[in-house]
Image: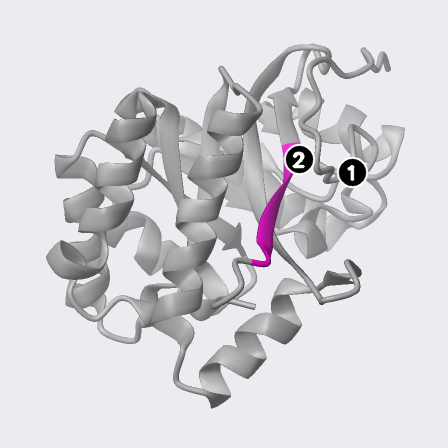
Amino acid sequence: MLAESRLTSFFQPIVHAQDTSLIFAHEALMRGRDRDGALVSPARMFDTAREADLLFQLDLAARTTAIREAVRHQLRTHLFINFTPTAIYDPAFCLRSTVAAIHEAGIPAEHVVFEIIESDRAANAEHLRAIVDFYRNAGFKVALDDLGAGYSSLNLIHQLRPEYMKLDMELVRGVHADPYKASIVQKLLEIASQLGIQTVAEGIETPEELSWVRRHGVDFVQGYLIAKPSGVPAVVTPRLND
């Protein structure tokens, strides 16, 4: 698939919580295609890449594909791009082609947000900080993804000081009906507000979940209630009222 350039990106909109018709950003989500054109899941590709010692090559291809597809679709919103910290052994070497591709595409650096996947981060905190510092020095912003999915979320907040925090969908799902989840999410939103970090609630699937996170001050939302990932980025989404 790498040799034959059979990677593509789907895009899922990230919208303003208080007005879901306003798109703030699109998250680029890697997809592959087999020789018959059928989609191949990113989980299957990453598992295979780890076994074949091709994680660096796949992660780089995913990033450059996201940039290429964003340019092809003439996206004017912010662009969220995932990366796998364990695939990056030397930030200056591994990421320079990504930075060059963004500059060559004419995408403003301040519109690009790199998401650290909390559940697949580098074990070495210093190495992870070096990656984040490299991105920030290049003018990009950083999001901590899947917040609440792992065991070191609070440590990562103070170590990395992200501009965005994305609340894990398992925490958000059914939050309006689960006092334990509600208490945890509310505290995370309070922490983010106090630290000046903007928040994204992932996995919004019901009007009740949307209503709850709105009331508790989340900045942006993302999920199937808003729009599913698509090969053609959404230009506008329906306005969802309480």
What percent of the width, then of the height, locates residue 165?
46, 40
Q: Are marks 2 and 1 in contact (CB under 8 Å)?
A: yes
User: Is disc 1 surrounded by few (<14), some (14 to 19) or many (20+) residues within 10 Å?
Assistant: some
The residue pinned by badge 1 equals 228
Which scheme is used to colour this image of the protein? one colour
Relative to 100, 71 lies left or right: right
Q: Quadrant of the N terminus?
A: bottom right
Along the line of sight, which residue is nearer the eye, 235 or 163? Answer: 235
What percent of the width, then of the height, locates residue 30?
58, 53
| In magenta segment, residue 7 | yes
Q: Is residue 228 above or below residue 133?
A: above
User: Is disc 2 surrounded by few (<14), some (14 to 19) or many (20+) residues within 10 Å?
Assistant: many
Q: Quadrant of the C terminus?
A: top right
Along the line of sight, which residue is nearer the eye, 134 or 76? Answer: 76
Q: Secondary structure at mark 1?
A: loop
The residue pinned by badge 2 equals 12
| Range shown magenta | 6-12
Which image quadrant is residue 54 in? bottom left
What percent of the width, then of the height, locates residue 100?
22, 39
Q: Amino acid at mark 1?
A: Lys
Along the line of sight, which residue is nearer the eye, 25 or 65? Answer: 65
Along the line of sight, which residue is nearer the eye, 137 or 69? Answer: 69
